[in-house]
Image (tube, rainbow, N blue to C red):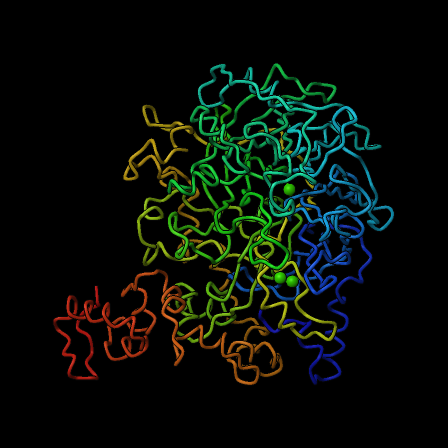
Amino acid sequence: MRRPNRLLRVGLALSPAALLTALFSVQPAWTQEEPLRPGEAYVTRFSGVVPGPGGAPVLNPTGTVGSIIDVRTPRAPPLGQHWIDEPQRKPVTASQVGQVFGVALDDASPPNVYLTATAAFGLHRTANNQQWQPGMWGSGGPGTVYRLDASTGYAPRVFAQVTLNGRQNTAAALGNIAYDRANKQLFVSDLETGMIHRIRAADGGDLGFFDHGTQGRINFTKADDGQKANLPPIAFDPNSRARITDCPTRFDNSPQCWNLATSGRRIWGLGVRRDAMRNESRLYYAVWSSPAFGQTVWNRVAEDDKRNSVWSVRLGADGNFDASDVRREFILPDFFTKPQDIARAGFSQPASDISFAECGQRPVLLVAERGGMRNLGLAAQNPFATPHEARPLRYELDEKGAWRLVGRYDVGFWDRSRDGPPFIRANCAGGIAFGLGYDGNQWVADPGKPDQFVWITGDSLCSRDYPCNSPEAPQSAQQQGTNPQQVAAQQGGPDDSEVHGAQGMAETAFEEVAPEWAFAPTPPQGDNANANGPNQAYLIDTDINVDGAGKAIPAELARNDATKIGDIAIYQVCEAPTVYTFMPLPAQGEHRDDVSHARHASHARQSSHYRWGSHDPYFSHNRWGSHNTYWSHHRQGSHNRERSHWREGSRGHSTERSHWRQGSRGHSTERSHARSGSSQHQGDRSHARSGSNQHSSDRSHARSGSNQHNANRSHARQGSSGHQNKIQNRVQRSTTTINKNQGSTQGKQRSR
Ligand SMILES: [Ca+2]
Ligand SMILES: [Ca+2]
Ligand SMILES: [Ca+2]
């Protein structure tokens, strides 16, 4: 966060006392030896690249693919700022464990960490396609589960090799991993075979597998109506293999050759829930149904079967799968509406993670989507998934035992104004976990507040065109009763560093799932355009963004790491509840049908059925500036010495970071000019920042900062030829009381 953090001060000329404070209050990154502590996170991510032979990028074998991130001590409220000096430690590298996505913790104290091999960050062969690049699989292969033992300081080792009756995974690798406390075992999804394996925690022994494609689909209960149903079985062909040597196109860039499991039996996200009231454990798993990877059969399956879905299978007293008790818990709500998107990716992107509230009395299930799998190459932007089209979703259990979709978390400031509907902040990177809430005075994680925060991995949490809040803006917003983004714009400076990593926010701060305005042809205006979620969140980039001397590293603040972030797990210690508070059932006669709610196609959008938020008892609490707990805590910010000092720009002044934006010393023509339409005005860039391809008078004119429209100021600001016609039209249509011949006219009405 860009308050005057302790790390940034270290490199400056400080008083001896201040220097001492700085040295002792923060350990340099990577040096702490403690095991995981309650409240801390473990986050996976892509290793990054280094120049290879001939200069083309190759996997960086020494790049970090997972680490502990200490999210316990932000010492400031969550207000949409980049927390730049988050402590990290215990990195593991690609040469040790390869590329990994899934992460789970067991219930040892302190817990051990489990990581699973992945193709989610692409498959990477050497240039001659003779072998895997170093750093692709570490010491194992595509079917490997690694364990980082707490007792050895989290030194990684091969824990299990997932095989199907001895058949090795050929490339598609594993999906995710979940720990089952009651039965001391782990579940691992295999993205090639579609099987879910049961692995003994004590020694990594394989206790068997569940085949959703042939066991789950043929006999299940639909949770929404309690009826039995079946779908045609889809079997795995054990003779299939990744087409490494005979792919018609380059293997690395051709996921259709990776032998990913068939649509409808492809399992990614997993979660285990023990229901103490029913004395029952179930394994939840996410099924990925999609036309991607050349799965033309998808076009011919039933409508339900085309959607991504979450299922569960009961676990018997011995911890084994009970295939006689399979439930289709819910179908995920549609994201895409455009035919070309549906033809590309299906109705929504896959769910790569499932998490439960383990401590609180309210049964809550969180699902994280990820933008599919692809590999555009190691030199490409957004190489490994389609960014900005994946949601974190929240379900709650109702009195009848059905999971009801109650909300969606906004993640990242990127708002899809340049992508098209839905205009929501859908930058989930596919990992989600509950974490500790914070003490509202000190802003330190409170072990007495388990499950009160959610941490979500995300792409483009902040970026040049969708920036973080500046340190000053939230306070001004509070004083002015508007949102921080607008204030930041007025003050001439949001923080435009690139932040890709994890977003943490109050678990109650969720949004309506599919608001009507999000599906309008043009981006929303006014309140609907506000970044409610990220405005009340901590935003962390998973890279180390400050150097050993405590200075920000400009290259780290400028690099787009979208699609390179993985999964997250958080260590919490709590007593599991024995009674629950359920989501109330709808009033008699009121419509409720999760399946039809999931479908845009089946409803007119004006239908109130999409307005889950209006049925949601928590919804009213997440409005920016209304009765949000964290917002009101922010009032203390004006008395916070650190923050005040920062604003005066004295001791905490960091030349590199301050000048980064202003472009004085490190003036970058490209970056400076792209931001504000100077002589090299680029119509598409500048206008896109205003929130739409089409000039929006509401938004653009509001940036001039006055309630009363001032034609002179607003119009002069854009100054581009491409802008002229629209401005003229707008002026002629809307400002009959403004005399354009008088440059200093005060507008008598707003432009709209
Ligand atoms: Ca960082
Ligand atoms: Ca980064
Ligand atoms: Ca997870």
Which part of the image, by quadrant, shows the C terminus? bottom left
304 sits left or right of 86 in the view: left
31 sits left or right of 378 in the view: right
Q: Nearer the viewer, residue 466 or 56?
A: 56
Image x and y of residue 536, in percent: 49, 57
39 sits left or right of 516 in the view: right
Q: Nearer the viewer, residue 116 or 291?
A: 291
Q: Nearer the viewer, residue 385 or 690?
A: 385
Q: Residue at x 51, y 24 (%)?
A: 401
Q: Nearer the viewer, residue 386 or 198?
A: 386
| Quarter, ligand 1 | bottom right
Q: Is residue 607 above or below residue 132?
A: above
677 sits left or right of 471 in the view: left
The answer to whether residue 552 shows anywhere in this view is yes
Which part of the image, by quadrant, shows the N terminus? bottom right
For residue 492, what is the image quadrant? bottom left
For residue 696, what is the image quadrant? bottom left
Image x and y of residue 406, in percent: 45, 38
Q: Residue at x 61, y 14 (%)?
A: 324
Q: Residue at x 57, y 56 (%)?
A: 562
